Image: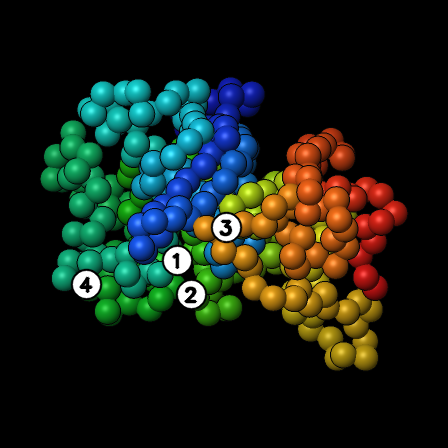
């Protein structure tokens, strides 16, 4: 059993408390509220899905989890520890346990390096292994990711998109990560390849006890792989809970709208529900709406939504929502 798999079930791999991430605007006079106060945990062996439209803050959350962005406010605790309080050497050692796989497999690989060199690079930075040991681990990782050994001598342009993404997956395996942030990892791949990559993630999770933060805009993909799902909008969570509840019994109108936008492989006359079209664009994160952030596009918005920020409330066991009318007769998804 791996160290990750043996970790106590009650101890989160990552615990996020009041996370806020700010960026200066292009003019430097205003602040972009990319993430504006989110709380969640990711447990050992769990896949935590994060969905939302472009600009909702989901990728920023993922980069913060991987240590690529500092928190402006709030805390990110890794197995109970705040890595910001560690020494530089301690941070470098612990940081390798939290890896990220990006959306674009082409941009993630150096076109001037062979696949073998790309696999060796993180191990060289990590240190502690001989050249022979690193090469052995590299070939072992290629095999685990479903790639032939002869591909190690090729360059990225000689591989398909699916093969490149497998290489990116293979690169992190020698580092023995505990959490892997998957940022739209199948969005750039052909539909025929997506299932293979998702199955690879699933088998790796079972074998190594990995935890995933799975970020996507495709609800069907997130629903297929996630144990729990958080729905983001303008830097905040609108809803969070077990995947079964969020997908089949949503409590927030934004979640309902996202679900209604999923393509249905049926002729129009055979579909039993209609799509809910949200009016307008996502408001600017520089100056988000008062009260409920979704109110400017919500079909159920009332005067109260403009005045009051909805409480983050638990409507079912483990199922949280931020909506004044969640669970009431006022909120009924259009048929």
**In the foreground, 13 or 322:** 322
- C-alpha gap between disc 4 and disc 1: 17 Å
Marking on residue 111: 4
**Residue linked to disc 2:** 188
**Secondary structure category for the residue under label 2:** loop
Task: Quickly name the residue at label 3.
Answer: 287
The first of marks 4 and 1 along the sequence is 1
Q: Residues within 10 Å of mark 4 (few under 14, many from 20)?
A: some
Pinpoint residue 165: horizontal percent, then vertical percent.
36, 58
Mark 3 → mark 2, Cα distance in angstroms = 32 Å
Residue at (44, 29) in percent of width and height: 74
Q: Which residue is mark 1?
A: 103
Sequence-earlier tag: 4 or 3: 4
Residue 67 appears in view: yes
| Position of the N terminus by quadrant | top left
Callout 4: helix, strand or loop? loop
Return the residue nearer the eye: 73 or 61. Answer: 73
The disc, 3 or 2, on the residue closer to the chain's N-terminal end is 2
- Residue at 18% across / 45% down in the picture? 121
Mark identifier at residue 269: none
Q: CA distance from mark 1 to mark 3?
A: 28 Å
Colouring? rainbow
The picture places residue 4, in percent across and down from the top left corner, at: 43, 28
């Amino acid at each position: 059993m791996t160290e990750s798999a043996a970790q106590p079930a009650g101890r989160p791999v990552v615990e996020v408390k009041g996370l806020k991430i700010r960026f200066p605007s292009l003019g430097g006079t205003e602040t972009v509220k990319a993430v504006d106060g989110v709380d969640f945990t990711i447990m050992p062996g769990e896949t935590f899905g994060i969905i939302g439209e472009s600009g909702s803050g989901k990728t920023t959350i993922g980069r913060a989890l991987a240590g690529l962005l500092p928190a402006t406010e709030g805390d990110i605790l890794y197995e109970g520890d705040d890595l910001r309080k560690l020494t530089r050497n301690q941070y470098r050692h612990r940081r390798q346990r939290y890896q990220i796989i990006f959306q674009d497999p082409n941009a993630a690989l150096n076109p001037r390096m062979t696949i073998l060199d790309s696999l060796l690079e993180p191990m060289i930075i990590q240190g502690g292994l001989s050249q022979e040991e690193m090469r052995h681990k590299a070939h072992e990782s290629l095999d685990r990711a479903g790639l032939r050994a002869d591909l190690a001598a090729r360059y990225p342009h000689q591989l398909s998109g699916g093969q490149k993404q497998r290489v990116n997956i293979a690169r992190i395996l020698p580092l023995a990560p505990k959490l892997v942030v998957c940022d739209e990892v199948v969005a750039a791949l052909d539909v025929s390849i997506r299932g293979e990559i998702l199955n690879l993630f699933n088998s790796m999770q079972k074998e190594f006890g990995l935890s995933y933060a799975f970020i996507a805009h495709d609800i069907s993909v997130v629903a297929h792989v996630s144990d729990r799902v958080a729905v983001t909008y303008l830097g905040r969570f609108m809803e969070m809970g077990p995947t079964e509840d969020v997908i089949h019994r949503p409590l927030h109108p934004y979640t309902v709208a996202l679900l209604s936008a999923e393509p249905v492989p049926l002729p129009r006359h055979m579909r039993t529900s209609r799509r809910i079209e949200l009016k307008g664009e996502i408001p600017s994160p520089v100056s988000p709406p008062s009260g409920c952030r979704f109110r400017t596009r919500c079909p159920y918005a009332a005067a109260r939504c403009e005045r009051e920020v909805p409480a983050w409330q638990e409507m079912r066991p483990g199922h949280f929502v931020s909506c004044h009318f969640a669970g009431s007769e006022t909120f009924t998804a259009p048929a």
